[in-house]
Image (tube, rainbow, N blue to C red):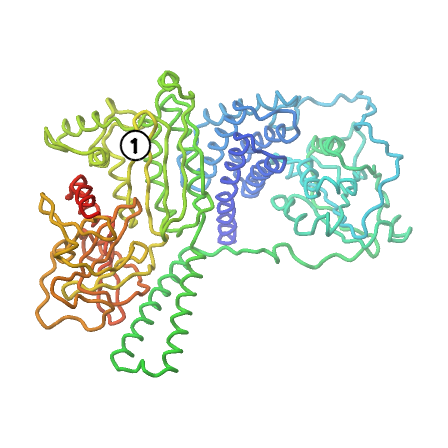
Amino acid sequence: MGDVMDDILKIFFEECDELLPELESGLGELSEEESSKETINAIFRAVHSIKGGAASFGLDRLVRFAHVYESALDCLRSGTVEPDPAIIKTFYLAMDVLSDLVAEARNTGDPVEDSRIEENVHKLEAIIGQGGEGQPASGVGETPVPEDFTPVTVDLGGFDFDEPVEEAPARTLTVRFRPHSELYSRGDDARNLLMGLRELLPEDALGSLQVTCDMQDLPPLAELSADEACLGWTVQLPEGAGGTTEDDIHAVFDWVGDVCGLEIIREEAAGAASSDEAEAAGDGAEELPFIAEPEAAVALAEEGAVPAPEAEMAASSRPAAPARSGRKRGEQNASIRVDIERIGMLMDMVGEMVIGQASLESALTRENALHDQELLKRLAVIKTLTRDIQEAVMAIRAQPVRHVFQRMQRVVREASALAGKDVALVLEGEETEVDRTLIENLTDPLTHMLRNAVDHGIENPEARQVAGKPAQGTIRLSARHRSGRILIEILDDGGGINTQRVLQTAIKRGIVPPGASLGENEINELIFAPGFSTAEKVSDLSGRGVGMDVVKQAIQNLGGRVTIKSMPGKGTLFTLSLPLTLAVLDGMLIECRGSIMVVPVSSVVELVTVRTDEDVYTIPDGSHVVSVRGRCIPLIYLGDELTLPAEPAGQAGSHHMGRAGEAGQLIVLVVENEAGARAALVVDGVRDQAQVVIKSIEKNYRQIQGVSAATILGDGSVSLILDVSTLIVSATKRVDTRALEAIAERAA
């Protein structure tokens, strides 16, 4: 039994991982004044679901705080409190506490201090007080009821109970529920269930909603016990178009199923049952029918919330009730939960299948069997299926970056509080999908960069006002796809990078020698040097000389790169370029000095043949450039750059798409990085284009300059995957760009 409960608890925490981002997203819409009634309802439901699930497992600290949070959100939902910036900030801080309490219950976070919980509870109770709540959020009042108390007539909001009820739709669902005592004792109440049922219907269908209160078990006031539940409810809702379904109803009672009796009955038509059946169904029940508007529903629900509920709804002795649906909740779920390790194993097997398919093709080529047209057709089918399976598995592994982006809201809030600044984080492209492995490894680099942007990028409010900027700084975090990669940008509207200060600090710390002459881009790159920091003193945010170098290393480990652009007084832009997946890529197989290497197809611009006497130029620093279509591009002799041994004479490969056939000609592969910089790689030939499986070279060997990973070819040999961006940076740093411009003008 313990293992079963552990599995259920694991599912609860997984659902918390989904509900907390929904809560944060909804609060973000509130702060941007884009909220709707549904947004507020979604926020409320997220907290309510967390509270209900936590109550099922006896997580009392989480339940108590969530109950107060829920009560404050209810004031927002009822319209008694408007979501001004101060209130939204309180909700954000409460969300952080709620998240930490979930982590505490999960044993993945430090215990939450009681003082912090109490501080946030007081702030939430202040909101409840603004909403006109007469009782504290903790629930039941403690004042005893006097025995001589005389009940008074209650005005239920001007409802005329003698008015005929609107004709019910052809098909209705009747929901009967009776809360147990445990429901109230853990901080829930029937009001939330009634409101949840009401929210299932669109506004134009609310007239079809009918609610009756079953007061059959309600004792005289003098005998009323505060520890027992005495009331039940019957709710009739339209089914189908404009109405709801049984699954929707079960979702409302999701977290109270163990402490609330529930019965759902489908009726073909209101009043279709015989008068005898109607009398039997209502026998002994003193019912009060009315159209369920919020005020009326809340009034009756709260009357039942003072005493806490009772055990199971008694088995009905009613004759022949209308037929119930035998369909269980959850049978129509559109998704299932799968352990990520299983998907990882599946991805590994797909990778091996790609290698196996390439191996088969290579073997058939060696046997000269590919002249058989039938065999070629079947091999083409296998290749197509292999690619389709790989793309399908990649789609399963793909997740929107929203999951990591929304966590960054809290990072910015906490960093802003520590720095004493007012900073807003704007998210864009949250639905951009990338491999799950990348998402898991993006949290730490993005955290470092955002904290750095708050501390060093955004100025103090006073300095911003002097510069004519709004007191609130803005950081924009965005994601988008480009050329088979994902670009993540962090743009702040701060003061930009002070290049002189960065250079002086680098000289002071011995990172660069005194008198060094560096360009602006090279100075900006210094902030990634180990031990570099411009902070004058160590703080909770910065000053220890670690952070940005860790960011660069982490991004490089993912096969990505970081670039910086800054404009003094305007802000700084950091761009992270990452592969969409760490598993498979489309590559171009090239030959160089007897070795077969892979260049990512996404980096290739074109393949051209040039003449050394007409198109290749030597510039003063000894480097070479090549003129391609009127544009001068740094020329990289790949064999020399990678220090490959010269190929022995007579051992040139035979299977290729291109090879220098005349003296004085070069085969040049023009490549480009994400920043638009280009270089020309001199190669011996181009063999083919193929899908290759990425294998880490650092784990299996060591890091090699200019190489990002390795792969296994169809013949079983190991081939290196080139890091195009590193090669381009290496070339452009050695080439004087002014000389390039002069050569380009002369060539034109």
Q: Secondary structure at mark 1?
A: strand
**Image vertical order of residue 567 relative to residue 587, above or below:** above
Of the residues shown, which amino acid type is indicated by label 1?
Ser
Picture residue at 21% right of the left edge, 58% below the top: 668
Picture residue at 30% right of the left edge, 49% below the top: 558
Q: Is residue 129 left or right of residue 216?
A: left
The picture places residue 88, in percent across and down from the top left corner, at 53, 27
Indicate the quadrant where residue 666 lies: bottom left
The picture places residue 342, in percent across and down from the top left corner, at 41, 59
| Count of numbered marks | 1
The picture places residue 639, in percent across and down from the top left corner, at 14, 58
- 206 or 732, which is in the foreground? 732
- 650 or 146, which is in the foreground? 650
Indicate the quadrant where residue 693 lies: bottom left
The picture places residue 674, in percent across and down from the top left corner, at 31, 47
Q: Is residue 583 left or right of residue 229?
A: left
Q: Residue furthest right?
A: 275
**Image vertical order of residue 464 relative to residue 261, above or below:** above
Indicate the quadrant where residue 201 lies: top right
The residue labelled by disc 1 is 566
Crowd tier of the residue under label 1, counting other residues whose Cα lies within 10 Å: few below 14, some 14–19, many 20 or above: many
- 691 or 67, which is in the foreground? 691
**Image vertical order of residue 723 relative to residue 546, above or below:** below
